[in-house]
Each structure stands twice: as C-alpha cells, then as structure tokens.
Image (tube, rainbow, N blue to C red):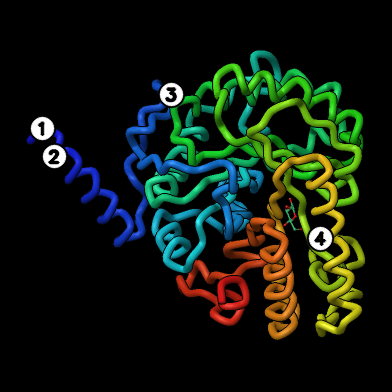
Amino acid sequence: MKKNGVISFLVVLSFALCFSNCINPMPIDLSTPFSSAHATPTPRAFGALAVQRGINLGNALDAPTPGEWGVSIQPCYFEAIRSAGFDSVRLPVRFSAHAAKSPPYTLDPTFVALVDETLQPALAAGLIVILDLHHYEEIMDDPAGQRQRFLAIWQQLAGHYQGAPENLYFEILNEPVKHLDAAAWNDLIAEVVPLIRLSNPQRVLIIGGADYNSISALDALQLPDDDRLVVTFHFYEPFKFTHQGAGWVQGSHEWNGTTWNGTDADKRLIEEHLDRAVAWSAQRQVPLLMGEFGSIITADPASRQRWTAFVARQAEKRNIPWLYWQFCSDFGVYDCQQQSWDTGLLQALIP
Ligand code: GLC
C-alpha cells in the first residue's frame, strides 16, 4: 500500500513537473503495447457522447515529418486546453508516412513512440483524445492498391492501443476524396470496422462520409451495425470566407477580404446545412460530431469571431459536439510561440 502510494505520488509529481515546465515526458518503452498505466482512465457515458467542445491539434503529427509545419505538441498545451474549457482534442496523424510501403507494412516504432508520448499527457489531463488517420494521400489516389496497407496500419494501431483507456477514440480516416469515393469508402469501412473490433470491442470509432467529410456525402454512407460509432462531418461554409488565401486552395487569394457579417441570409445558410446533418442523424439513429470547423487566421478578426460563435452555438443548439480546427497555426486560436490565446476567438468558442 505504502509503496503504491509513493509510486502514485511520483507519477503525479512527474506529470506536474512536466506540465509546469512544458517539456516532453520521458520516452516510453515501445516493446510493449500502449499501457493505460500511464494515463488516468476517465469513465465516459457513451449515450450522450462525452465530447462537447474540443480542438484539433493540426499541423503537427499530420505534417510530412513531425515539426515540418512548425507545430510540435508540448504537454503543457493540454493543460491550457483543459483550463480553457475544452474536453477533447483531435490528434491528426499521418501514419501513412511512417508505415513501410510493402507487406507487412510495419509502422515505424520511433514514430509510434512519439505519438504515445503526445497522447499520454492528454489522456492524463482527462481529455478525450481522438486519434485520427490524417493525410493518407496515397489512398485517395489508389484505394484498391492501398487497401491491404490501410488495413495493416489499423491492425497494428488497434493492437497497440488495445489497452488504452476508453477516453481514447479512433477516427478511421480523415476526409476521403478523389478516387476514394462513397462506394470505395463504404467497402473499406465494411472491412476495417470488424478488424478494429477484434481487439477493441468497446472503443468509440468515428467515421465521416466521402467528399471531404461533407454533410452532403452522409446520405451515401453505409455503416456496419455497431452501436459505438459516431459520424463526423467537417464544416467550412461559406468556403470563400473560411479559406480565403489558403495556400492549399487554388485561386483562394481572390477571396481575400471576404467578411462574414451574420446577416439573416448568412445565418440561414449555416442553419440549413446543420439541419440537414441533424435530419440524417435522426433518420439513421447515429450520433453526430462536427469534427472540424474553423476559419483562416488572415480573415478579419471580427468576422472570425462572429462566424465561430454562430456556428458553435448553432451546433450546440442541435446537440452536435464540435472540435474547432485548429489549436495553433493557420486556423489557430492559440499562439504557440507566445503561449497565449486569441481571447476574442476563444470567447467565441467558449463564452
Ligand atoms: C482538412 C485538411 C487540413 C486543412 C483543413 C482546413 O483537415 O486535412 O490540412 O488544414 O482541412 O482546410
């Protein structure tokens, strides 16, 4: 008993020091599967999906190599996120850049260890963590050719995180697009869900529709009979406002200066989209999640605040949990260099 007490104290102390100094925790031993002993499991009632307000930690582990897009996740960010009132984080990870190109498609253990190091303080801070397979570009170009590799990646991840606490959720694939159309995506879902269920029978799984996880693609989405699935959609309407000047959207600099004024027509457009998602969810009896919504940092701040507050409140009114895209960087609400929030935008998210 006494020894356990001392050990618990040391664990708590090491996390406390880690948060207060904002440094990375010690690397873990990857020869064993992810262990829940590193984190505090938080019991969650699935009935009312525990995510309410969350944030995406984009541009970090979803970059081609970690840090390449200027974001390295520090354990202290999770305390900042929790203290600000968020209950969840989505962690986009480009696992496809760290898996062998030929069978058995082994994941790079050093990279998986980095993901573990990133996850552990978030789980320990009591946050729900959505581990998201992001930017798997090869599968968008060639779904058939990548099928076995995609399944092998999930088989490895499912095995590795099998013992993780239940506040770790899996999101199967971000934004299917191009050749990964609704039909090809439905085929993959039918195969990957039972595969993950072999080792993770209870874990919450998140799946979105094709066409960049759009609301309009929900109708074509086919889901296995599984009562622990949540369906996600991404919301960036009006796109010319949210993506003005986005380097990855051709011609978007022509939209620079687009404001969002919150006229009746502006609001109606957003409400209609969300109502469509809600109608789908009611008909199919599947819980919804707005897994990404946000606007680019170069848009006018007052418009960003108006749009963000309106979308967030409208989602809440419809009982749709949301995760803002994104924490820091190009759609950000936090300055990782200064370690400070954009307080106007934060207030729009969490009044
Ligand atoms: C998607 C993309 C991400 C982008 C965001 C906003 O999540 O994967 O890279 O920043 O949408 O466009």
Task: Residue 334: give x, y in percent of width and height.
Answer: 54, 70
> Marks 2 and 1: CB-CB under 8 Å?
yes
SS of the residue under disc 1: loop
- The image quarter containing residue 151 is top right
The residues bearing labels 4 and 1 have C-alpha atoms spaced at a distance of 53 Å
Task: Residue 277: give x, y in percent of width and height.
Answer: 82, 53
Q: Is residue 27 above or below residue 153?
A: below
Q: Is residue 339 above or below residue 68?
A: below
From the viewer's perspective, tell me whether residue 221 is left or right of residue 121.
right
Camera-near label (2 vs 4) is 4
Q: Which mark is residue 33?
A: 3
From the viewer's perspective, tell me whether residue 107 is left or right of residue 340.
right
Q: Earlier in the sequence, mark 4 or mark 3?
A: 3
The residues bearing labels 2 and 4 have C-alpha atoms spaced at a distance of 49 Å
Tell which residue pokes out farthest to the left in this image. Answer: 2
Residue occupying the point 81% across, 80% down: 260
Type of the residue with mark 3: Pro
Q: Is residue 81 above or below residue 174?
A: below
Q: Which residue is mark 1?
A: 1
Q: Looking at this view, is 24 or 19 the one in front?
A: 19
The residues bearing labels 2 and 1 have C-alpha atoms spaced at a distance of 6 Å
Q: Which residue is mark 4?
A: 274
Q: Looking at this view, is 285 or 88 the one in front?
A: 285
Type of the residue with mark 2: Gly
